[in-house]
Amino acid sequence: MFFASDNTSAAAPEIMAAVAAANTGYAMPYGNDPIMEQVRARLRAVFEAPDAAVYLVATGTTANALSCAILTPPWGAIFCHRNAHIEEDECGAPEFYTGGSKLVLVDGEHAKMTPEALAQAISFTGRSGVHNVQRGMVSLTNTTEHGTVYTPAEVVALCDVAKAYGLPVHMDGARFANAIVATGASPAEMTWRAGVDVLSFGGTKNGCMGVEAVIIFDPAKAWEFELRRKRGGHLFSKHRFLSAQMLAYLEGGLWLRLAAAANAAAARLSAGILTVPGAALVHPTEANAVFASFARDGHRRAHAGGAAYYLWPFDQSLEGPGGAPLAARLVCSWSTTEADVEAFLNLIRG
Amino acid sequence: MFFASDNTSAAAPEIMAAVAAANTGYAMPYGNDPIMEQVRARLRAVFEAPDAAVYLVATGTTANALSCAILTPPWGAIFCHRNAHIEEDECGAPEFYTGGSKLVLVDGEHAKMTPEALAQAISFTGRSGVHNVQRGMVSLTNTTEHGTVYTPAEVVALCDVAKAYGLPVHMDGARFANAIVATGASPAEMTWRAGVDVLSFGGTKNGCMGVEAVIIFDPAKAWEFELRRKRGGHLFSKHRFLSAQMLAYLEGGLWLRLAAAANAAAARLSAGILTVPGAALVHPTEANAVFASFARDGHRRAHAGGAAYYLWPFDQSLEGPGGAPLAARLVCSWSTTEADVEAFLNLIRG
Amino acid sequence: MFFASDNTSAAAPEIMAAVAAANTGYAMPYGNDPIMEQVRARLRAVFEAPDAAVYLVATGTTANALSCAILTPPWGAIFCHRNAHIEEDECGAPEFYTGGSKLVLVDGEHAKMTPEALAQAISFTGRSGVHNVQRGMVSLTNTTEHGTVYTPAEVVALCDVAKAYGLPVHMDGARFANAIVATGASPAEMTWRAGVDVLSFGGTKNGCMGVEAVIIFDPAKAWEFELRRKRGGHLFSKHRFLSAQMLAYLEGGLWLRLAAAANAAAARLSAGILTVPGAALVHPTEANAVFASFARDGHRRAHAGGAAYYLWPFDQSLEGPGGAPLAARLVCSWSTTEADVEAFLNLIRG
Amino acid sequence: MFFASDNTSAAAPEIMAAVAAANTGYAMPYGNDPIMEQVRARLRAVFEAPDAAVYLVATGTTANALSCAILTPPWGAIFCHRNAHIEEDECGAPEFYTGGSKLVLVDGEHAKMTPEALAQAISFTGRSGVHNVQRGMVSLTNTTEHGTVYTPAEVVALCDVAKAYGLPVHMDGARFANAIVATGASPAEMTWRAGVDVLSFGGTKNGCMGVEAVIIFDPAKAWEFELRRKRGGHLFSKHRFLSAQMLAYLEGGLWLRLAAAANAAAARLSAGILTVPGAALVHPTEANAVFASFARDGHRRAHAGGAAYYLWPFDQSLEGPGGAPLAARLVCSWSTTEADVEAFLNLIRG
């Protein structure tokens, strides 16, 4: 019953096996290993993007911050949702890597920007010439921080706003696989065909040990990315261990199977919670995270029974009288079992 | 016959086994995994430093750059040898992480700073008050970039110079294990007892997949380190995979056994090369790297025979008439075998 | 009829005379001129702060950005009003000088933060430990960007919130003189007695050519300020010309007389506008800026008659049918005359 | 007898008069003043560069650091002489403004780089691909920090090296006027015709209060410069006071007359010193600075008699027995009189 985050899961066995298999003999370092050649070809094929530049890093924060750094100058604003990971959970990594850009926060229900809110934020920025930060780039997250999903059409609508102002678009796809499974969209239509310029393609939260790809659809910025990655300390010498994870992740559609399992677990969990009297969803369950409220008593039983998850927002308390509902975030992963879900539901049902 | 770098080797089987063993069930992310508790205790014991703050990152550049960032302000000079890794091989990562500090280069044979040269460099810096960059910190590398080793007494002498100016000292120990094996010193006498404030304790080049510890002997800067690590994108969510490597590396002295094997291979290689007519050492062989010159013909045979290594400096050429000696760098690792060495020697002997 | 900004005015004759008088013979550079000695003593006396560190720079953006840089680390949030100059009008200078901090925006009517809104913004920041930017500092502006004024009691209330979280406080006093005149407070009670740690003390907008003082009430950060000033290119070699302006500005209370003239002109202008049918204030007129709306016809006549000022916000248009009211910002300075005001009022009255 | 630096002089009367004359009525701020229009036209004419972008800042460090920032990315090396002002006297401003670039130091007698030394430094940098800082830009100083002058032919030779590597060239012309007077070259042949891309055109050291122009011969980087200037706090609101200085400086060749006076004074001083037994030049006197050694006794008499100048290098001492020669730097300015020179010579002659 571990719903604290998908990053608390182990790596999938296929990933670990590939890493172990890569551990033979010598390999050229720093991304020159032969497995990386295969990764590059495979990702280009998956995304139908034969010219894309493809790089691996070990953390999602790195993928996002380096992506921002190649897309906006220091004086450019990064337009993103108020709850974006780059705003809330990276200790200012985008500001650090860009050399001090400003994140301009856009509102929208369920952590999704609306085109109207995005357009307003952009139009209000940089109107006084040199005195303001300039319009820099847009970053959107799919799946979002609240477990919701942008459809390709919604991505198109946001990219259209960005393009109207000449701005490049980054997608934080730490849970990209979950979004693809949820929508049935192809990777290409969810990204470059919709107007996305750079994608953080997550592996870690979906069954890898620690690997993310950055896919740069227009490779003009590729060399700059390589320099920034090295300068940031993110170029692995024994790079084969990143490559091996990513190749196994793509092999035979493993990435989609893992995400499908996580999404299905969340659907089951969400449906089950809604059968509890007084329970309600805080955000729609569209991928692998459930945001729901249910009685404080249920939370107490869940915690007592060993369930791990966060009250969301943090400033709620299990202490206090009665059964007033509290909101929680429950994240499923590839390794969440039916038994986990049922055990949890039994606890909160009391 | 792979002598290009110790980072081209595989991970030692004990390391890989520990990583696989760690891959069970759920674990709290971001350094809160239980294995990290053991790593912390073990490193404190190894270094006889019960209060030291201990953190893991995945690359040596990261360990060095973050260490510099907590030891000097942006306007502080970093005094290091002209051939230091932080100067030559990190694409300016120290400048990036410190916010623009200046590396002031110190000379010295075989990549070792002398106390006199260090003192002069420090005394010449910051003499004009606010107009100059200030004296910031000292960074020394052990083993050095030329395969030589500072003894504890030599480290003391350099730290004494630094301390006379009130400067903190960082040691780049990407190959710290090799230095310990070479000198027989204890980890404590090589570091904090000699005056070192922060150590980059390398694992990657010595049989790990990708892990380095940063050991901060005075923990006052620990929280700042944590923030800088996160902000730099270097805090792993599935941190257990770093922890597992480091714990196995320390377990039963594995780190010293691996380094001893590498040093022994280099000694054998060095001695063998010296039996070749016309061959000579460019730098003394004191740890796991051999810098030697021998006839161009020998180089041609070695390359034709499949040996991998770099001419050093790079701007020499295998092309050209005759057998004029060329200099090379040959790095041994834990996995270098006697057979590798003998095969290589047979090639260059012709 | 020049109400575009107080920075479009000339320098007061006393200021210019002092600059000319300083232009004799040789003077030591970089702040070591004898006039600076007097400035230091005078500012310490005016602020009843005998230990304060006092520095001069040439622009308000510099004063603010350097102040922030010594008060917060790169990972610290700067809490300020949504309309603060540091947020809206400095092209990201605070982000640049701090090394990438994040401005967290606080709401409040008439560009004034409320203690409640400030407390909420602070409490919501940095709750997830290392994953978030940390709480860094508070910056408030007096007079505000909307021409309103914080009383000393209001400053105390905001500083109390900051201090409850251990945060230092900066005051952007580009129009500090106007705030002092408006409230009758002493400089000390408006600043360090209320809890302000560093003040940007403006001269440029109030009759100087280009000079701002930074007053650091706790001088522990003085040396860091000097280094950051030099490193930012803001240390003047012929510093006497900054010193001379500031000394003349303080001499005989000139700074207060100039501000009093500007505030009186704004009061007259504001009162006059309110006699125009349909006119209204957008923000209370408390210092030297008037934010008022009046009929589009009046604006057209004013522009045709040569009045210079901005519609505020910018995205209003003089074009279009009828007399619908438009909002404007009208800034008075020391040099605004009664005749200017009357001429303007006559124009908008039609 | 004030030879400490040319920046200890007053402003020339023409400059001060122009500043006073500019102080009438209202003027648009931030470089939109009408005088700046004239400055732009005048500088384009002087440099025969009708498309050049022209900006004003108040300090030489700012002019240099902003110039570097638009010419090299953070990971680019700046090749300059070991004694360049950007290396020795700006507290790391270039590193700050570029976001952490590395200054690679080139040797050469009398503070002049040779093409050979420059070519070697460039060729040795960035040879290991992503692991090194890249080749970024070249910066040369004319006149140099040791009072010597590059001829146009010498500038061509250095620029040719830079261009062979595709690198842009910056010239630090804090004393550009002195170099023009010394060589008789035209401004165009000393700069863009020789291959210089951006010039810091100094006014402050040569009779202005505090103004430097940055002349960007290829205006593609102009908008970036404007943003960096604003973001750095260097955009003056009452910009007319910078404009007025620069316009008067150019008017009727004042800038050349002032420099000619300074150079002539230095020539007289240098010749006079050489008549003193035991005296010698440390560097040739080619512009307005004299680097000479003469007997310690002479120094003692000069100091006792009120002469102001620096022993150069700093670590020499007037204390000690006998008359062993000590080296000094003596800088003349537009305001150095024959009487000053004669009085000084009389003192050292004893």
Image: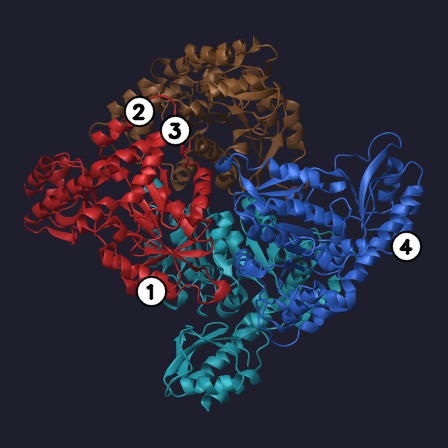
Chain colours: A brown, B red, C blue, D cyan
Identify the subunit bearing mark 3: B
**Quadrant housing residue A325:** top right
Q: Do the dots labelled 4 and 3 sit on one chain?
A: no
Q: Position of residue B348 (x, y in %)?
A: 9, 42
Kindly report the distance in space between the C-alpha atoms of the residues bearing marks 4 and 3: 72 Å
Q: Which residue is mark 1?
A: B119
Q: Nearer the viewer, mark 2 or mark 4?
A: 2
Residue at position x 43%, y 48% from top? Answer: B221
Q: Amino acid at mark 1?
A: Ala
Say which chain tag 1 marks: B
Real-space Cα separation, disc 2 to disc 4, in angstroms: 79 Å
Q: Nearer the viewer, mark 2 or mark 1?
A: 1
Among all residues in the image, which is located at the extreme bottom?
Answer: D350
Instruction: Write down the chain letter for disc 4.
Output: C
Q: Residue, x 48% and y 47% (percent of image)? A: D99
In this rendering, is residue A109 above or below D33? above
Residue that carries the numbered disc 2 in the rendered image: A244
**Residue in the picture at 66% in, 69% down:** C41
Residue at mark 3: B238
Question: Does residue D121 appear left or right of residue D235 in this picture?
Answer: left
* Secondary structure of the residue carrying numbered label 3: loop
